[in-house]
Amino acid sequence: MMKKAFITERATILVMVIVGIGALAFLLFNMGITPQNSGITGLAAANLPPAYTGESAKFVIKQNAPVSLNLAELFKDPEGIPLIFDATQTENMEVVLEGNELRIIPEPGFTGQRVVTLYASDGEQVAPA
């Protein structure tokens, strides 16, 4: 029994240390302190994934009316790295992605629900919407 308690205690401490390091990194990043401007040398900056910053992940498209979205307004990279976008295809809609511009064009007369998943990448990390 003693061995199991020791393993559980070590796992709990490890989780606490990881959470603590993550919280400290989040706090420093939000204060604008990065390894590049902190004066600390020998640290490589961690590349954080892009974040979806849109107000909603659901968009309503009127029947027979295409919609255009500027994905650069919906995703942001914490380090300011330019993003690359991708989108899945779906039935009854044409999904066209050109640079930052996404156009979704429903087939004439189509009504219903479809899912188009959007992805943003900074070249290292990928974030779905």
Image: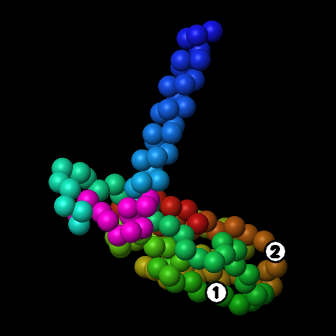
Closest to the observer: 102 or 24? 24
Q: Which residue was labeled with disc 2?
A: 112
User: What residue appears at the point 50 percent right and 32 percent down from the top-left corner?
Assistant: 13
Please state which amino acid type lies under the numbered disc 1. Val
Q: Quadrant of the C terminus?
A: bottom right
Closest to the observer: 125 or 31? 31
Q: In which quarter of the image is the N terminus?
A: top right
Residue 44 appears left or right of 14: left
Residue 5 belongs to magenta span: no
Query: Percent from the top left, x then y, of residue 40?
Result: 20, 56
Marks 2/1: CA distance?
15 Å
The mark that comes first in sequence, 2 or 1, is 1
User: What residue appears at the point 42 percent right and 54 percent down from the top-left corner?
Assistant: 24
Residue 14 appears left or right of 64: left
Please state which amino acid type lies under the numbered disc 2. Gly
User: What residue appears at the point 55 percent right and 31 percent down from the top-left corner?
Assistant: 12
Q: Residue furthest bottom?
A: 65
Residue 65 quadrant:
bottom right
Q: In the image, which residues are magenta?
A: 26-36
Say whether marks 2 and 1 touch (CB < 8 Å): no
Residue 37 quadrant:
bottom left
User: What residue appears at the point 64 percent right and 86 percent down from the top-left corner?
Assistant: 67
Circle 1: element type: strand
Residue 93 in view in this figure? no
Labelled disc at residue 67: 1
In the rendered view, tell whether residue 23 sits above or below residue 76. above
